[in-house]
Image (cartoon, helix red, strand yellow):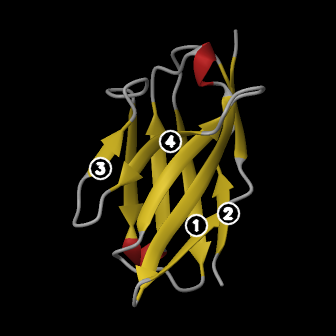
Amino acid sequence: QVHLEESGGGLVQPGESLRLSCVASGSIKSSDVMEWHRQAPGQRRELVAETLIGGGTRAADSVKGRFAISRDNDKNTVYLQMKDLKPEDTAVYFCHVWGNTDGHYYHYWGQGTQVTVSS
């Protein structure tokens, strides 16, 4: 079993930056995909950024150039560096990890961390 714990959320003004962290306790493989999702009030959860199998990262068009995902496998941690934050970035941000072992897929969600962008 894997437990994911996010941190780093908070209240910031437009244009400011935040870095979110998600620490995984338990068995995480370097081949597991680690993602950040977000959900604003009344809206569907959406994928913000992800690490790709085999390396590399991808970000949603809405955050491309402003958000960057990275991971430290030694620390079982994935980060989301967010800059030039906008009010529309306000949401609960969730960490998601998924992978497979011998064809059996698994996935885990964190509890989320609130990011509020407001002047």
In x, y percent, where is residue 90? 66, 25
Neighbourhood count class around disc 2 (C-alpha, 10 Å): few under 14, some 14–19, many 20 upward? some
Percent position (x, y) of residue 35? 48, 54
| Residue 53 position by quadrant | bottom left
Mark 2 highlights which residue? 5
Judging depth in this view, the residue of 10 and 110 nearest the camera is 110
Q: Quadrant of the N terminus?
A: bottom right
Residue in the image at 44% along x and 74% along y: 99
Residue designated by label 4: 47
Q: Earlier in the sequence, mark 4 or mark 1?
A: 1
What kind of element bears circle 2? strand
Frontmost residue, 18 versus 52: 52
Look at the numbered discs 1 and 3 and tell me whether their residues touch, using CB distance below 8 Å: no
Name the residue rendered at 45%, 40% in the picture.
Answer: 81
Above or below, 113 relative to 11:
below
Mark in the foreground, 1 or 3: 3
* Residue corresponding to mark 1: 23
**Mark 3 or mark 2, earlier in chain:** 2
Determine if residue 31 is in view.
yes
- Left or right of 29 on screen, residue 90: right
Circle 3 Cα neighbour tier, 10 Å, few/some/many (<14 / 14–19 / ≥20):
some
Query: Of the residues tagged 3 and 2, which is closer to the observer?
Result: 3
Q: Residues within 10 Å of mark 4 (few under 14, many from 20)?
A: some
The residue pinned by badge 3 equals: 57
Specify the amino acid type for callout 4.
Leu
